[in-house]
Amino acid sequence: MKRLLCAALSALLLLTCQTAFAGRLEVDLSVDGTPVSDMLYGAFYEDINFAADGGLYAELLRNRSFENRSLTSPKSSDSFTSWMFNHLNRAEGTVTRMTEGGLNDNNTTYMRVSVESGAYRVVNFGYSTVIGRAGIPLDEGAEYGFYCFLRSADFSGRISAALTTVGGSPLSDAIELTPSGEWQKLSGVFTAKETTDAVLSLTLEGRGSVDIDMVSLLPKSAFGASWLSGGLRADLVEALRALSPRFIRFPGGCVAEGSYFKANAYNWKDTIGAPETRRENENTWGYMQSYGLGFDEYFRLCEELNAEPLPVVHASTLCQARGSQDAPYTETEKESHIQDVLDLIEYANGDETTAYGALRAKNGHPAPYNMKFIAIGNENWGDEYFYRYGEIRAAVKAKYPEIECVVAAGPVASGALIEHSLAVIRSRYPNDIADEHYYMDSGWFLRNTSRYDAYSRNGNSIFLGEFAAHEPAVGGRRPNNMYSAVCEAAYLTGIERNADLVKMCCYAPLFARNGFTQWTPNLIWFDARSVVKTPNYYAFMMFSNAVGDRYIPANADLPDTVYSSVTASDEKVYIKLVNAGNAGEDITVSLPLTDRRALVQTLSGKAGDQNSFDVPDRLKPAETYVELVGGKITVTLPAMGILVLTCEK
Ligand code: AHR
């Protein structure tokens, strides 16, 4: 019995000793440290998962211009996607898809409604996941700007627009529309009578034919509501702003290149100017882009968020990672593509005496955007890519030597492909920024925090242009859970240690509309009304908002599961601790600072925990202040947790 008691006691002691092991981190602020890039944390915005239409772009109607079509499965092309006719009504009439005599050369398809008798109703459901269900979120008292283009030679009767229920009961007052014999833009403002989901109803009561195109509904409260295309969804802009992105990479991803067809490669010239003149196209991910969020909005968003624009133009190749073949590269295609790239730079940076600078001014922004970077190619590799890259780059550098070029290093983290890419880049383009992409299992990120420690400092700087920790899929969806967030955060401690070399990094993809996804995981989820920030979002935000301009190597004795990084600016010191283990750890931090308060932010949960639309705040950073007395502080780093300590110097 005595022996048993002794054994139990020593086991208890051992256990106490194990949990009481205090990690130690000693920070010497007198060391110079290594520089940390001032552009380290940014965002990669791609129109995937309906991140633009139905997402960041504030337009509430889907397929407003009847241009919906599919290059990948032409048979399923449907110009009337998201529209319904004569729903629950008994009017007599027909609807015809028209392409002759359209609004303009870029927007050719429109709808002709011919009414025989009764009140014929044409309805747009917005972004509804279920056909026939109202998908336009209204807030009582809020205002919604409406416009459409109409034309009619013979209609006699009354035409009106209103926000209604699916059955046609009014949720706003009606706007009367009187067409003429030529295309004419008619507009008005609705005020919502209720907080509910609605449809837009155009009601034609009388006899004759009416041509309808470009029907738009935008909240007056949109961010940038005065911009040409009506602005962006304010809650999503704020979610992005909170990440403090120092740059925004755009528009892809494979969206920049197109998959399978060159016809759906992104052409920036299609995406600027009056919305009804933008030439819509299907994107890589198989759905239409209205380009209401195009290059005008992109540059303005960067300006608003104080982020450097980092546009990606394709290298006359298709999306190689999606298995597409090399696109043809004839002399004509090459020349016109190179000209497009040069024109983009002029559009961004030229003064008003240049053709594209003047066009930018006409489109609402007289001042240049002062763009500094361009990525040529998204996620490419191989000799043909590097050849085309070299030609496009040479043309850019000849005209704009100050622009920094970003060169693709392929879609994988290791192996012959990336080694070859980096070798080519180092030898041929030693001053360019090499863009690495990798999506790996979560554990890989923990095991590879020292990836960049061994990279040469005598060559290219690195842009980690796409990364995410991938967990096994459950129900077809790879989750954004606490474990993946911790693994990414641990990895970011290694990135900060190497932020003299790794100039920029961004998670991918950024946005996903629930029910409209082609890819998981994603940083920010949303539906018509709510935004769900993932633990990965919060981890990235905590890092992005607490980083100095130099990395300070610390003297550390930490448990194996704990990763750390210390950076400092002239004013502050930032200490990050990441615990991938299942036990909390007490860490004593020694800092040559005393008698002051330090901000402690923590994010933790169980490995599999996630935020959801039902419980969006399950995982969220908590904040508290601790006193720094005698140059020491002991913090409890939670199990499966991230802790950021910020202290004034
Ligand atoms: O981020 C999603 C996709 O992943 C990007 O479009 C592409 O570059 C990569 O393969």
Image (cartoon, rainbow, N blue to C red):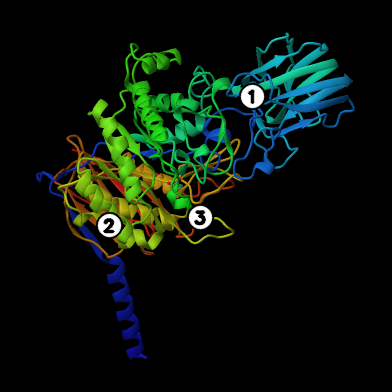
Task: Identify whether 333 is placed above or below 150.
Answer: below
Q: Residue at x 32, y 90 (%)?
A: 3
- Mark sitting on residue 388: none
Q: Is residue 358 visible?
A: yes
- Residue nearest the viewer, comparing 373 with 607: 373
Residue type at mark 1?
A: Thr
Q: Sequence-wise, which precedes: disc 3 or disc 1? A: 1
- Residue nearest the viewer, comparing 30 with 269: 269
Q: Residue at x 27, y 57 (%)?
A: 419
Neighbor class of circle 2 (other Cα within 10 Å; few <14, some 14-19, many 20+) is: some
Q: Name the quadrant containing residue 152.
A: top right
The residue indicated by pointer 2 is 419
Answer whether labels 2 and 3 touch (C-beta < 8 Å). Answer: no
Q: Is residue 464 visible?
A: no
In the shown orientation, is residue 58 left or right of residue 642? right
- Mark sitting on residue 108: 1
Task: Identify whether 506 is placed above or below 12.
Answer: above
Disc 2 and disc 3: Cα gap in Å?
30 Å
Residue type at mark 3?
A: Pro
Q: Position of residue 123 (x, y in %)?
A: 75, 28
Neighbor class of circle 1 (other Cα within 10 Å; few <14, some 14-19, many 20+) is: some
Q: Position of residue 538 (x, y in %)?
A: 41, 45
Q: Position of residue 603 (x, y in %)?
A: 39, 50
Residue type at mark 2?
A: Glu
Task: Identify whether 60 is placed above or below 361.
Answer: below
- Helix, strand or loop under label 2: helix
- Mark sitting on residue 479: 3
Q: Residue at x 9, y 44 (%)?
A: 30
Q: Sequence-wise, which precedes: disc 2 or disc 1? A: 1
- Helix, strand or loop under label 3: loop
Answer whether labels 3 and 1 touch (C-beta < 8 Å). Answer: no
